[in-house]
Image (cartoon, rainbow, N blue to C red):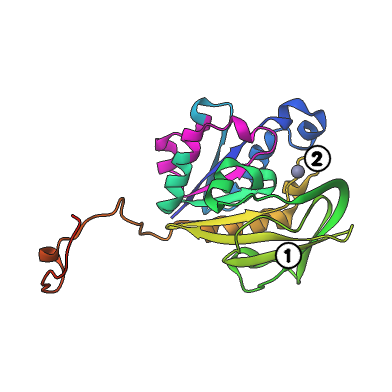
Amino acid sequence: MTIRVTVWGENVHEQQVPLVASIYPQGLHGALAAALNADPGISATTATLQEPEHGLTDARLAATDVLTWWGHAAHGEVADAVVERVQRRVLDGMGLIVLHSGHHSKIFKRLMGTSCDLSWREAGERERLWFCNPGHAIVRGLPGTHLDIEQEEMYGEPFGIPNPDEVVLLSWFQGGEAFRSGVTYRRGAGKIFYFRPGHEAYPTYHHPLVQQLLRNAVAWARPEGGAYPAGCPHVPAEKALEPLVVRGGSVH
Ligand code: ZN
């Protein structure tokens, strides 16, 4: 079964900053969708902030197995109603891959419940991502023990996230900092992967191994079936699975 991916892009710096437009003429979302579509098992399309409802209608989300999210300059412009809609879909089982500066997006902060703050520096330094668990599906098939990206923005610890379910990638930066660069969570029935690299001033998403890793992440994050029932249904004693005599008082 093909994995249906919606690649969401803020699409602001691509329009405003010539450097970014020169690296990503189709937008970061365009480059990411093309990279994902290199896998015949993935069908990726794009949606952007500027579209009505940011391109994330109920119908669109219902037809999305995995949503990827890249934003930086306009997190505040994302409508709260859309954020709520995305959160609901994640709880119902949709996978979510949050990229780079998406750490400060409304949706990521809402799902984490913490500041998601970090330290940063834009100096084009080398980033080395260590594979903390070489057996993890997200790094499957990647050669060696780590992945080097020649130029990246630095993100440093402490990273204001809850303790992850898994730390898949740990970054070292040329300037000396370290960062939990690939972390996973479950929220409701949905799987979440945060992936740090992807500063728009550098060609990170053209890197073949980064692309491979993201295709792996999509496969990992796809829904596994099943979802929590909505609400909190009351099960009266007479409908209990086993015979039950009501004891004690009640406020209902
Ligand atoms: Zn950045």
Looking at the rendered structure, the number of numbered marks drawn on it comes to: 2
Quarter holding ligand 1: top right
Q: CA distance from mark 1 to mark 2?
A: 22 Å
- Considering only vertical position in the picture, is 203 above or below 56? below
Q: Position of residue 216 (x, y in %)?
A: 60, 60
Q: Is mark 2 within 8 Å of ligand 1?
A: yes
According to the image, label 1 marks what residue? 170
Task: Please rate how many residues cluster around mark 2, counting C-alpha atoms within 10 Å: few if below 14, some from 14 to 19, many from 20.
Answer: many
> If the image is split into quadrants, where does the C terminus sit?
bottom left
Q: Residue at x 12, y 64 (%)?
A: 239
Secondary element under disc 1, as helix, strand or loop, is strand
Left or right, residue 101 beside residue 48: right
The image shows residue 147, relative to residue 45, as above or below, that is below
Residue 113 magenta-highlighted = no
Residue 190 location (% of width, % of height) = 46, 56
Q: Nearer the viewer, residue 15 or 114?
A: 114
Q: Position of residue 96 (x, y in %)?
A: 53, 51
As drawn, 227 above or below 132? above
- Residue drawn at 72 percent across, 31 percent down: 14
Mark earlier in primary sequence (1, 2) = 1
Q: Specify the farthest residue to the front.
A: 249
**Observer able to see residue 7:** yes
Left or right position of 67 against 206: left
Numbered circle sitting on residue 201: 2
Q: Which residues are magenta?
A: 54-83
Residue 223, image quadrant: bottom left
Question: Residue 191 got which mark?
Answer: none
Question: Residue at position x 14%, y 74% from top?
Answer: 242
